[in-house]
Amino acid sequence: MRSTESTSPCQLVTLASGPLVRVDRCMDCGTITLHLGAVSLRLDRAAAESLWTTLGHGLGSQTELPRESLGDHGRFAH
Ligand SMILES: [Zn+2]
């Protein structure tokens, strides 16, 4: 009875894990799997790198926003 093995042909190895996301990689075909809570995203390596790059650009642009202007905005009066 190998019915349980056929449902998961990929041999996943955890590359990294955090409080929100776990990153697995298949040692057989190289597919990257992102586990986000109950959601699993399966990507090939190029797609995973593209996602990572886009994510980095998005977060990088946000850090350029000055936080002080938000906090001081209400008090700023001449
Ligand atoms: Zn695989």
Image: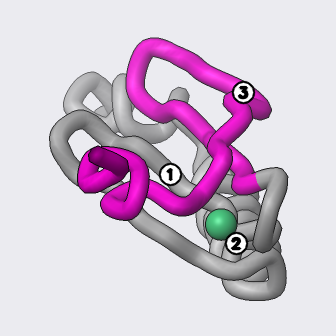
At 32% across and 60% down in the image, what residue appears?
Answer: 7
In the image, taking residue 37 as reference, residue 64 lies left or right, namely right
Q: Quadrant of residue 43?
A: bottom right
In the image, taking residue 15 as reference, residue 10 lies left or right, namely left
- Seen from this angle, which residue lies furthest front? 1
The part of the chain drawn in magenta is 1-26
**Rendering quadrant holding ligand 1:** bottom right
Q: Mark 1 Cα within 10 Å, few/some/many (few <14, many 20+)?
A: many
Callout 1: helix, strand or loop? strand
Distance from disc 3 to disc 1, alpha carbons, whole Å, reads: 10 Å
Q: Is residue 70 magenta?
A: no
- Amino acid identity at mark 2: Ala
Q: Earlier in the sequence, mark 2 or mark 1?
A: 1
- Amino acid identity at mark 1: Leu
Q: Which mark is residue 34?
A: 1
Can the viewer see residue 61 in this picture?
no
Q: Badge 2 is on which residue?
A: 48
In the rendered view, tell whether residue 72 sits above or below residue 70: above
At 32% across and 37% down in the image, what residue appears?
Answer: 73
Depth check, front residue: 13 or 4: 4
In the image, taking residue 14 as reference, residue 3 lies left or right, namely left
Q: Are marks 2 and 1 in contact (CB under 8 Å)?
A: yes
Depth check, front residue: 32 or 78: 32
Q: Mark 2 Cα within 10 Å, few/some/many (few <14, many 20+)?
A: some
At 72% across and 50% down in the image, what residue appears?
Answer: 25
